[in-house]
Amino acid sequence: MCPGAPDGQHRGMRLLSLEERPFHRIRFLNAAKRGGTETGHLPFLRGQVDALPDGLDALLLTGDLQGVVQDWTGSRLLGLEVAAACVSLSERGSLPDPRRTGVLLAGDLYAAPGGDVRGASGNVTPVWAAFAEAFAWVVGVQGNHDTFDPHPDTLGRAHLLDVDGVTLSSLNVAGVGGVIGDPARPARRQEADYLAGVALALEHQPDVLLLHQAPALDATQRGDEALSRVLRASPPPLTVCGHVHWDQPLGNLPGGASVLNVDKRVIVLTTCQ
């Protein structure tokens, strides 16, 4: 039986539940704190929503894929491996058809080729292109370590948002890229400018607000306090974020609205059967 929606939750697609146990993992390398690399395991989690956008069987959400996968063929970005793995899992019947799945990317999809440089920045266009080729559509925001080819509009079914919105398969998504910080550095804004951008994005009345920056919900779900105040004032049904890892990825705003942190996770949302 499907769980009920949280009391008081309002318009838009409602997140009903999120499983804690991964159904798949990808082994990858990322930069260790003291130099070199360490092994990580990217979890794939299932979640349930009350309804999906028109013509879709699933939504895939992920972010902060700052790692590489190495095998006899060489080294490739973790995001490329995720896109390929989803196609393989679909062929085995473990995931819905990617052609009937929308993708939401919360930013920071780059890693140094050896996976051994913390905070490396670089071109994530190939990752976006891989998702755009395999899936129904892609919408996302820029992380503070992401750069793009000069003409990202060549990505076809991919939509890069920043203080704007788009409606795809009847799903209204608004997004703000980057983080609060020194505007002299890439993909950063002063706090007042960033929060004004979020407020403008919320004027689209999105079903999903897509951010790279995470709000602060409590001591274990860390983020930016000022951002959380803006979201509490006008909470969208679902906020998707990353940038700071939460051990518990699902949080709530007043009124039952959900916040889903996809930092180093792949979350697949389907309806209850």
Image (cartoon, rainbow, N blue to C red):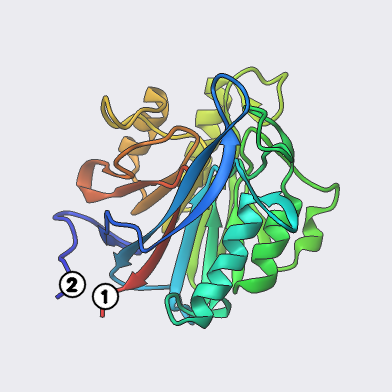
Task: Name the secondary structure under disc 1.
Answer: loop
Left or right relative to 204: residue 238: left
Query: Which one is earlier in the sequence, the residue at label 2 or at label 1?
Result: 2
On the image, the x and y values in percent for residue 239 come to 40, 48
Left or right relative to 79: residue 57: left
Q: Is residue 3 above or below residue 44?
A: below
Q: Residue at image x 32%, y 38%?
A: 247
On the image, the x and y values in percent for residue 189 come to 62, 25
- Give the residue at mark 1: 272
Pick out the residue farthest to the right.
150
User: Callout 1: few (<14), some (14-19), or many (20+) C-alpha neighbours within 10 Å?
Assistant: some
- Give the residue at mark 2: 2
On the image, the x and y values in percent for residue 207 come to 41, 58
Q: Amino acid at mark 2?
A: Cys
Q: Residue at image x 50%, y 35%?
A: 243
Can I make out residue 96 in this image?
Answer: yes
Can I make out residue 168 in this image?
Answer: no
Whether tag 2 and tag 1 are in contact, CB under 8 A, the answer is: yes
Quadrant where the image shows the C terminus:
bottom left
- Give the label on residue 53, or none: none
Pick out the residue farthest to the front.
72
Q: Residue at image x 46%, y 78%?
A: 96
On the image, the x and y values in percent for residue 127 come to 69, 55
Task: Name the secondary structure under disc 2.
Answer: loop
Quadrant where the image shows the N terminus:
bottom left
Q: Residue at image x 54%, y 63%?
A: 103
Left or right relative to 134: residue 43: left
Q: Is residue 149 above or below residue 12?
A: above
Q: Is residue 227 above or below residue 66?
A: above
Q: CA distance from mark 2 to mark 1?
A: 6 Å
Q: Amino acid at mark 1?
A: Cys
Q: Nearer the viewer, residue 45 or 197?
A: 45
